[in-house]
Amino acid sequence: MNPNPNDFVRYKVRRQLDACVRRAVSSLEHENTLMAQSPISMFQRLLKVYKSLKPLLAFLTTFPLVPQSVRTGIGLLAQVLEQVTEAGPKLTTWFKAGKDLEEAA
């Protein structure tokens, strides 16, 4: 029985996807979820998870067994998250808790 060359590709892709999910879970395990979360810390957490799961989203947009409408939706979500990722540093420096209170005083 000859080995199928596609088996190696599938195995390699699966290992890469498993690794990206493990990285995302691992990065969240080290956070203190008992502390109150500010909007900016939740935003940074969203960006961290998106960056880790980006390969999985890219794979899902091309996987033929996923319905086309779902692939399109995942692709749109990935595009919007990518735009938010690019704007992330600007947003985190712009947001300052209590900034509006300082201006009123």
Image (cartoon, helix red, strand yellow):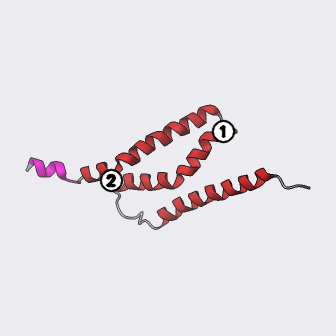
Identified at 77% across, 53% down, the residue is 7
Label 1 sits on a secondary structure element that is loop
Relative height, residue 10 to residue 83 (above, below): below
Callout in the foreground (1, 2): 1
Q: Residues within 10 Å of mark 1 (few under 14, many from 20)?
A: few
Q: Secondary structure at mark 2?
A: helix
The residue positioned farthest toward the left in the image shown? 105
**Is residue 9 shown left or right of residue 93?**
right
Task: Determine if the magenta segment contains residue 34.
Answer: no
- Residue at x-position 65% and y-position 34%: 67
What residue would you read off at disc 1? 66
Quarter of the image containing the N terminus? bottom right
- Where are the magenta residues, as a range? 97-104
Tag shown at residue 31: none
Residue 77, position in %: x, y? 49, 40
Label 1, label 2: how far apart the Cα atoms are: 33 Å
Relative to 27, say whether 68 is above or below: above
Name the residue: 57% across, 45% down: 58
